[in-house]
Image (cartoon, rainbow, N blue to C red):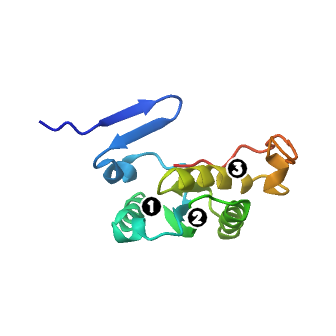
Amino acid sequence: MNTALSFSFPAPIELHFGAGKLSILHTLPMPGRKALLAISNGRSVRTNGALDRTIAELEQAGVEHIIFDGIQANPTKENVEAGAELAVREGCDFVVALGGGSVMDAAKTIAMKAVNPGRLWDYAMSGTGGRKPVEVEPLPWI
């Protein structure tokens, strides 16, 4: 009996989790035509084949991509701003996060910063942050 955890969870986004779920990426509706593919500055997604598999899935879905591999284990504002600048420069209309929590968090923030003006710190709600509300809906992200 296969006891591996596997599920889909719509609320209000659709979450696919479990072994083999990467292989269905090409069947899902894509929110754009060109993705910023955000990965860490480590080697794991390259050596375990996940990056190549993700690229193949995006290509099968007819989506162009550009790789941003500048996210470190504890992402900095410089990591996020560099990713957002690349997304804008390359004309990306959505973001794909491939990795763990740091990559996912950075990718969501890159999606916000790519379409909103000013510095990233303008939007921070604590400390010396500018507490500025997000003006433009972030790019979609996967």
**What crowding class fits label 1: few (fewer than 14 Cα within 10 Å), some (14-19), or many (20 or more)?**
some
- x, y percentage for residue 114? 72, 57
Give residue 72's mark.
Answer: 2
Give residue 62's mark.
Answer: 1
Looking at the image, residue 113 lies above or below residue 41: above
Residue sitting at x 81%, y 43%: 135
Residue sitting at x 28%, y 47%: 19
Q: Which quarter of the rendering shows the N terminus?
A: top left
**What crowding class fits label 2: few (fewer than 14 Cα within 10 Å), some (14-19), or many (20 or more)?**
some
| Residue in front for this viewpoint, 51 or 131 | 131
Q: Nearer the viewer, mark 2 or mark 1?
A: 2
In which quadrant of the rendered view does residue 131 lie? top right
Residue extending farthest to the top is 11
Indicate which disc, 2 or 1, sits on the residue closer to the N terminus: 1
Indicate which disc, 1 or 3, sits on the residue closer to the N terminus: 1
- In screen coordinates, is 133 left or right of 39? right
Task: Please tell me how many numbered marks the rendered image carries.
Answer: 3
- For badge 2, the amino acid type reads Gln
Tag 1 and tag 3, C-beta contact below 8 Å:
no
- x, y percentage for residue 40? 52, 64
Q: Nearer the viewer, mark 3 or mark 2?
A: 2
Which residue was labeled with disc 3?
A: 112
- For badge 1, the amino acid type reads Gly
